[in-house]
Amino acid sequence: MHAHAYYNVNMRTTIEITNEQRNQLVTLAAKRNQKGFSGLVREALEQYLNSQFNSNDKVENALLQKGVLSDEDADAFVKTAGELRTSWR
């Protein structure tokens, strides 16, 4: 019998960052009492990837709503949104 055990192993890679980005990462890692900043980069990458996938889901869900409002409700919504946008600036 041959068994394989898989562990949550991180892959090492190289990225290019500016000196300013490195300095900011080192500072933030120190505030968190972390030796290096690999954990910060992993965390940022995970948040970015999740936002990209969740963003696609939001667009798909929004497109599924097409036709849900009556023409009258849709016109009222567009009017209200337009009025709100004029007060944003």
Image (cartoon, rainbow, N blue to C red):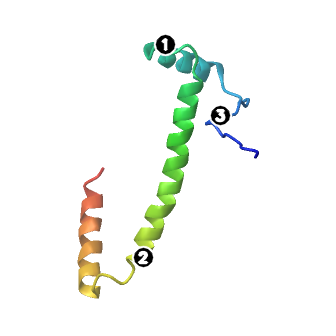
Q: Position of residue 43 (x, y in %)?
A: 52, 34
* Label 3 to label 1: alpha-carbon separation: 24 Å
Q: Secondary structure at mark 2?
A: helix
- Mark 3 surroundings: few (<14), some (14-19) or many (≥20) residues within 10 A: few
Which mark is first along the chain, 1 or 3?
3
Which mark is first along the chain, 3 or 2?
3
Residue in the image at 67% along x and 40% along y: 5
- Please tell me whether residue 46 is drawn above or below residue 14 in the rendered image: below
Q: Say which mark, if any, is on residue 30.
A: 1
Q: Position of residue 30 (x, y in %)?
A: 49, 12
Amino acid type, label 2: Leu
Residue in the image at 49% along x and 49% along y: 51
Position of 22 compared to 78: left or right? right
* Label 2 to label 3: alpha-carbon separation: 39 Å
- Mark 2 surroundings: few (<14), some (14-19) or many (≥20) residues within 10 A: few
Amino acid type, label 1: Ala
In front of the other: 28 or 72: 28
* Nearer the camera: disc 3 or disc 1: 3
Q: Position of residue 18 (x, y in %)?
A: 66, 24
- Mark 1 surroundings: few (<14), some (14-19) or many (≥20) residues within 10 A: few
- Please tell me whether residue 81 is drawn above or below residue 17 in the rendered image: below
Q: Secondary structure at mark 3?
A: loop
Residue in the image at 54% along x and 41% along y: 46
Amino acid type, label 3: Val
Residue furthest right in the image: 2
Residue furthest front in the image: 1
Residue hosting label 2:
64
Q: Quadrant of residue 70?
A: bottom left
Residue hosting label 3:
9
Which mark is first along the chain, 2 or 1?
1
